[in-house]
Image (cartoon, coloured by chain):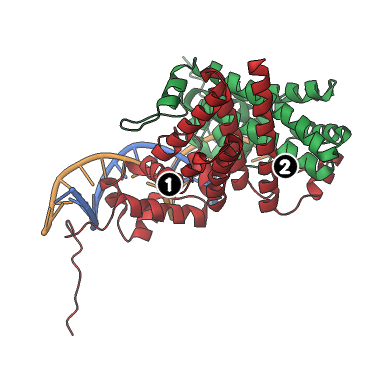
Chain colours: A green, B red, C blue, D orange
Amino acid sequence: MTQITQRRVGRPRKAVLDRVRIGATALELVDDSGDFTLPELAQRLGVHTSSLYHHVDGRSGVIELLREQVSDQMDAAALEREPWDVAIPAFFRSYRAVFAAHPRVVPLLTTTTVRSPQVLAAYDRMVALLEELGFPVARAMEVLTAVESFVIGSALDLAAPDVMWEIPEGVEAPRLAEALASQRDAAHRAEAAFECGLRMMLAGVAAELGASTA
Amino acid sequence: MTQITQRRVGRPRKAVLDRVRIGATALELVDDSGDFTLPELAQRLGVHTSSLYHHVDGRSGVIELLREQVSDQMDAAALEREPWDVAIPAFFRSYRAVFAAHPRVVPLLTTTTVRSPQVLAAYDRMVALLEELGFPVARAMEVLTAVESFVIGSALDLAAPDVMWEIPEGVEAPRLAEALASQRDAAHRAEAAFECGLRMMLAGVAAELGASTA
DNA sequence: ACCTGAACACCGTTCAAGT
DNA sequence: ACCTGAACACCGTTCAAGT
């Protein structure tokens, strides 16, 4: 019986790795376990840790791939809709929906800069929309950054433990305790708060516009 | 010449470490370098890594201490003011100010649950305020969580690199590019966006109240 | 109770060797 | 160009030994 042993050393005829496969596998890993290490990732890919360095710039490079993976799933086309107060919430809902599907990646992506072409295109479009509404450029950026902060915070809320607040023994917080007790499950809670905040933000845009043109 | 060599082994007469000193030193370290390791922390404290385990539960325990350090600096008393639309922004400004003073700790604190008595007292008071305004409990929690998400996102913005968005070569985003160019320095930018968002959120509270009681 | 020093498992990164 | 295997520095955690 001839054992066909695959060659184990040297360059394979066809590359076994590519950036997309690495990114997709890393996303799976984070979805499953909440974090990733390069050895774990390499194992899932059936490869040695050092092989990864031929395709990505170490751990931080993998995080970049994670960002690309989720960015690609956002619905940038949502911003083509009319009018602005349909387009903007539609985009941010898709933004949040992607993170709701992958909550555990959120903490990994909070610190770095946005470079994704699609996401940049979306923000470019939003700046244009806000300017059309009558905001001067500087004000448009303030509004946009404020909304962005809210959305990022809401995404983090998805990754948070079931309870955002926990009242230890001996601490008096009766109103908060009652309010916490009245909440539904975690997923519903986070979504309701997001929708509420989105409405508040849109009301805020209108108010800012009034103040800005007056 | 008699060399007075300090004893180096066994329990010291008086404990050299305590939780507050560990927390304060960890905060310094994160302020300086953006992160911390237990060996680094131990070195600053003039002690061996393993000594830390007599006072805190490893690395995650140190992160808890960091949370306590910053929570203690928030102005929970701000919520005693009147009326509500002075009290609430005053509290969140102090909340943000603490993180503005320690931006690099923010990414370390995003995932865990709030347990700090002072902060819980603040949220308890805010629930009460919102209920007095006429919100049912469930709605009050939605509003509060939305504002909290915005504030956390804004705190993260402080830790972010100078530019939140970066347009790579070949990517078309003329409006966004222009808007980015018009911005002032990072600190000013983040603060202006925060103040703008806070105004928007307050306008949103008013709008929600109208919708809720109508 | 509290600090030490050694030990362990694990991680990220580098690099020469192989095709 | 791309995978391997060994190597290195470093980290978090544990624990027996010492006072």
Work out whether residue B198 can be spotted: yes
Give the residue pinned by disc 1. Answer: B72
Residue B27 x/y as whole percent: 44, 52
Q: Please give the name of the residue rendered at 79% of the width and 42% of the height, measured from the top-left corner.
A: A139
Q: Please give the name of the residue rendered at 80% of the width and 45% of the height, measured from the top-left corner.
A: A138
Label 2: few (<14), some or many (≥20) within 10 Å? some
For the residues marked 1 and 2, what is the alpha-carbon distance in whole angstroms? 33 Å
Give the residue pinned by disc 2. Answer: B165
Q: Chain of mark 2?
A: B
Work out whether residue A46 can be spotted: no
Q: Please give the name of the residue rendered at 61% of the width and 34% of the height, measured from the top-left corner.
A: B150
Give the amino acid type for the residue marked by disc 1 in the picture: Asp
Helix, strand or loop status at disc 2? loop
Q: Chain of mark 1?
A: B
Q: Quadrant of the C terminus of chain A?
A: top right
Residue B49 x/y as whole percent: 32, 52
Helix, strand or loop status at disc 1? helix
Give the amino acid type for the residue marked by disc 2 in the picture: Trp
